[in-house]
Amino acid sequence: MTLPSEIDVAIIGAGAAGLAAARTLEGSNLSVLILEARERIGGRSQTLILPGDIVFDVGCEWLHSADRNSFVTIARDLGFEINETRPRWREQSLNAGFPAQAREEFLAAMDAFDTRVETASELPQDMPAAKWLEPGNRWNAQIDAISTYINGVELDRVSTYDFDAYEDTGINWRVRRGYGALIAAYGAPCPVALNTKVSLIDHSGARVRIETSQGTISARRVIVTAPTDLIANESIRFHPILPDKVNAATGLPLGLADKVMLALDDPEALPSDGHLYGALDRVGTGSYHLRPMGQSCISGFFGGAFARELENAGDGALAAQAIDELVMLLGSDFRRKLRPLAETRWAHDPFARGSYSYALPGHADDRAVLAAPVDDRLFFAGEATSPNFFTTAHGAQETGVRAAGQAMGEKTV
């Protein structure tokens, strides 16, 4: 599209935060345009429909804290079916490689670790969350593996304060036809310029000048929702420079979580919505969802340094690792029953460079620093700016609503 020369509010990024900002500004009598580098909306959300009508959310998948999640109401309003089957992340279906007594010991160790982190969050100095692992505990590697799934990184790089700040009500649901599809439907009415990569936000003049791959546009106000790594490495630059924003984004890097989807030729051999952990004695291992929502497939989940290693190994590496681990757990017959369908490579996505943010030790306060407006005309949103629902699509959505209110001059507490 040809960009207009002027706009009231420009929004950088058409992920959940940017779309929420645009939807909130509807009816405000302000002209609004989202500038999106990708050829699609949704950001770090996207639903693929794979052969066999298998729904694969390559990004966000779960309606976390569903009893407080804004997308639950949005889904119902838009006619999207919600699947309320709870995840079985604390279980090991079929007792495959993880006997019941050992599983109880692991869960007790995990709960004790969480309690120590909660207590440590009251200490006067922030520390790496890994400090609160019990020395010599046989389950430390598995506890660290869980961190790679939920934080995208190992515990030695995670702020204790930030780890404890995340709020999870324990109610997690899914969208039957995909969370990414829901977010795309939510954003469908929004005015968006696709394939429009922003390189410079010049706020030195009376209006903000935005340089993009499709030309230059000026705006009265700008809402920035780009992932933190793009601000930290100055893929998007500010003039005059905003060192506080760059430093805050640097303290909130994106962790990595990748998924692989495998077709299952004999679905009746496994329970619907079952769960398996891979190896229990190392941090680098997968978490497997058996037949999600009854589908004929298994989805695998990898995080942290191991996910990055698999990405760097090239296409097919995640699938090969997942199949090897599942054969180890389920038996050699399953090698011929599993077939790779799709896998993600979020670290190699130039418009994300990772999956979701975590705070480095000593940087939990950077979320508030990144969220703070500049001169009442630059506003910041995105999951990394959420105080308690970071890493989630609903956290991002809430920040978009907040930033839009700020852009309209509403006072926030």
Image: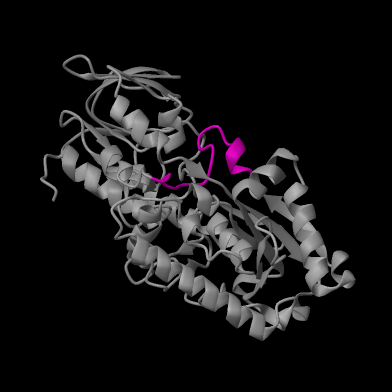
Total count of labels: 0
Which range of residues does the magenta coloring cover? Answer: 344-361
Q: Inspect this view and state whether residue 187 appears.
A: yes
Residue 349: say if magenta. yes
Is residue 190 left or right of 336 when viewed as pictured?
left
Residue 333: say if magenta. no
Q: Where residue 311 appears, x then y in whole percent?
A: 69, 42
Q: Where residue 115 appears, x then y in whole percent?
A: 41, 70
Q: Which of the 4 image quadrants contains residue 371?
A: top left
Q: Relative to 345, say whether 99 is above or below.
A: below
- The quadrant the N terminus occupies is top left
Q: Where residue 342 appears, x then y in whole percent?
A: 70, 51
Q: Inspect this view and state whether residue 27 appears.
A: no
Q: Which of the 4 image quadrants contains residue 144?
A: bottom right
Residue lying at 75% horizontally and 40% vertically, measured from the top left: 313
Q: Relative to 228, say whether 167 is above or below.
A: below
Is residue 236 left or right of 178 when viewed as pictured?
left
Residue lying at 38% horizontally and 35% vertically, measured from the top left: 249
Q: Work out whether residue 103 or residue 122 is closer to the camera in this orientation and state it.
A: 122
Q: Relative to 1, say whether 322 is above or below.
A: below
Please, which residue is most extreme toward the top here?
205
Q: Main secondary structure of the magenta part?
A: loop
Please, which residue is most extreme toward the bottom here?
101
Residue lying at 44% horizontally and 48% vertically, measured from the top left: 358
Q: Where residue 404 appears, x then y in whole percent?
A: 22, 43
Q: Relative to 164, say whether 44 is above or below.
A: above
Please, which residue is most extreme toward the front here?
135
